[in-house]
């Protein structure tokens, strides 16, 4: 059984016959959740199940351990952080879900806490269950608040897979099977301020008018694309010029992932509407928020039931999010993310310099890093080698040759050294194979 630093103390017994147990579980997937996912996991060599996880360590059903550097960005606090788990357990015993006929304390407190940590002026929160839902709320609010129709988005963007969010996203593979999408969306290349301004100008003049520009401060699923320095400020200026709203999608970058509570503060840009999700639940509960300034909130005040969700902002989810924000403060997770992030960034850049035949580029901020391989095949190989070595990473949905590394801020220095060592060996092996092709 493979061990990683910090692993070893587990509570849940392993299955007696792991191979038989895994086969039976995969068969259940195939029969009732669709065969494709099970087939893909098998193809990628993952013939096991996730079994138990704590902190930065995940254990599979065969007893092998992995360091968490993936999870699509959810585990900024690591797995099952005890403070978050305790808060959720307590809340579950008191009041798990809202009656929806009475107000409750956790939702009131979370709204107040979010306003305190958000960029200045983002006073109101609509709470929901997923990143895509928070984007839907943002798009609807933008149209209702401005009375205008057009939304300008960017190529390679990922905002989720519900209809509105998908319409804002910029990858045809996920969009084409579902056309017609929601009308009124246009796309320009990400990072090109001149193209953004030209298209905004065109939309502002056209019938319907420009309601909003939606951007990720750093494109995550697009392959960890950090925009040029003045891009976000240019987007802010374009919105101000045309009286449109700036929506920043911080579902992935928000709540500490890039080393600050929200990435947009690193460019000194305050949006009118901000969405956030993944890390907000502290790695324990799904919870998301759409935050907005007072000046554009009026449609939701005029009609409090115009946009609602039965489960959104449940006491359970809010308790997790409040505890997650507490942990960030008490454990200085933003400082940790900056320090660990610079070790990670320096380490990955050195590896990229050693293996230029495999790695085309390395980029990121804080604890969100992408390694761009020279081909998609090399990306798949690097991912497999890392998982075999005990490091869980993910690829990027809108640019699969970019492997993303998103470790928790609670990861120890020893664990980070293990990750970088595994990465070095995996990159070397990938380069050797690439040179033989
Ligand atoms: N927005 C961004 C920037 C994301 O990265 C994601 C998911 O990766 C989403 C929206 C959609 O979030 P969810 O998968 O929770 O719906």
Image: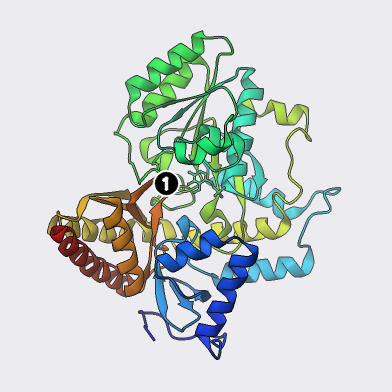
Can residue 77 be seen in this snapshot? Answer: no
Q: Position of residue 231 (x, y in %)?
A: 34, 29
Q: Residue furthest right?
A: 101
Q: Identify which residue is drawn at 41% across, 21% down.
A: 237
Q: Residue furthest bottom?
A: 16
- Name the foreground residue: 237 vs 426: 426
102 left or right, relative to 215: right
Residue 208, image quadrant = top right
Q: Identify which residue is drawn at 37% across, 41% down.
A: 266
Residue 42 to residue 298: above or below: below
Can residue 103 be seen in this snapshot? Answer: yes
Q: Establish whether ligand 1 lies closer than 8 Å to the Cβ of label 1.
A: yes
Q: Identify which residue is drawn at 86% across, 48% down.
A: 101
Q: Position of residue 210 (x, y in %)?
A: 53, 17
Residue 286, image quadrant = bottom right
Q: Quadrant of the N terminus?
A: bottom left
270 left or right, relative to 227: right
Q: Which residue is mark 1?
A: 221
All told, the count of numbered labels is 1
Residue 17 to residue 152: above or below: below
* Badge 1 density bin: few <14, some 14–19, many ≥20, Cα 10 Å: many
Residue 403 to residue 241: above or below: below
Residue 280, image quadrant = bottom right
Q: Identify which residue is drawn at 77% across, 58% down.
A: 97
Residue 65 to residue 433: above or below: below
């Amino acid at each position: 059984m493979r061990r990683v630093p910090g692993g070893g103390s587990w509570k849940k017994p392993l299955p007696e016959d792991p191979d038989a147990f895994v086969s039976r579980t995969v068969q259940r997937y195939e029969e009732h959740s669709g065969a494709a996912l099970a087939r893909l996991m098998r193809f990628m060599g993952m013939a096991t199940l996730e079994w138990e996880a704590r902190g930065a360590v995940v254990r599979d059903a065969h007893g092998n351990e992995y360091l968490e550097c993936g999870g699509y960005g959810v585990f900024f606090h690591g797995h099952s952080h005890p403070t978050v788990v305790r808060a959720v357990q307590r809340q579950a015993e008191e009041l798990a879900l809202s009656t929806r006929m009475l107000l409750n304390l956790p939702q009131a407190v979370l709204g107040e806490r979010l306003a305190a940590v958000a960029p200045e002026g983002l006073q109101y929160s609509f709470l929901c269950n997923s990143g895509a839902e928070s984007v839907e709320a943002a798009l609807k609010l933008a149209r209702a608040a401005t009375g205008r129709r057009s939304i300008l988005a960017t190529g390679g963007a990922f905002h989720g897979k519900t209809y509105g969010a998908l319409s804002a996203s910029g990858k045809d593979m996920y969009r084409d099977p579902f056309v017609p999408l929601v009308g009124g969306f246009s796309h320009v290349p990400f990072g090109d301020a001149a193209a953004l301004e030209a298209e905004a100008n065109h939309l502002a003049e056209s019938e319907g008018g420009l309601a909003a520009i939606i951007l990720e401060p750093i494109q995550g699923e697009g392959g960890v694309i950090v925009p040029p320095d003045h891009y976000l400020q240019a987007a802010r200026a374009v919105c101000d010029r045309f009286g449109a709203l700036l929506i920043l999608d911080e579902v992935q970058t928000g709540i500490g992932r890039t080393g600050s509570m929200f990435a947009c503060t690193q460019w000194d840009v305050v949006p009118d509407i901000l969405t956030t999700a993944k890390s907000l639940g502290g790695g324990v509960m799904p919870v998301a928020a759409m935050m907005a300034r007072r000046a554009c909130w009026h449609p939701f005040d005029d009609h409090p039931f115009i946009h609602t969700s039965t489960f959104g902002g449940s006491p359970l989810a809010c308790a997790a999010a409040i505890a997650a924000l507490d942990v960030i403060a008490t454990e200085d997770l933003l400082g940790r993310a900056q320090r660990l992030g610079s070790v990670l960034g320096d380490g990955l850049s050195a590896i990229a310099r050693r293996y230029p035949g495999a790695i085309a580029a390395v980029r990121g901020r804080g604890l969100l890093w992408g390694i761009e391989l020279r081909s998609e095949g090399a990306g798949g190989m690097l991912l497999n080698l890392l998982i075999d070595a005990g490091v869980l990473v993910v690829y990027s949905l809108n640019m699969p040759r970019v492997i993303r590394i998103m470790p928790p801020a609670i990861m120890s220095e020893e664990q980070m050294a293990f990750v970088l060592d595994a990465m070095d060996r995996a990159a070397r092996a990938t380069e050797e194979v690439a040179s033989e092709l």
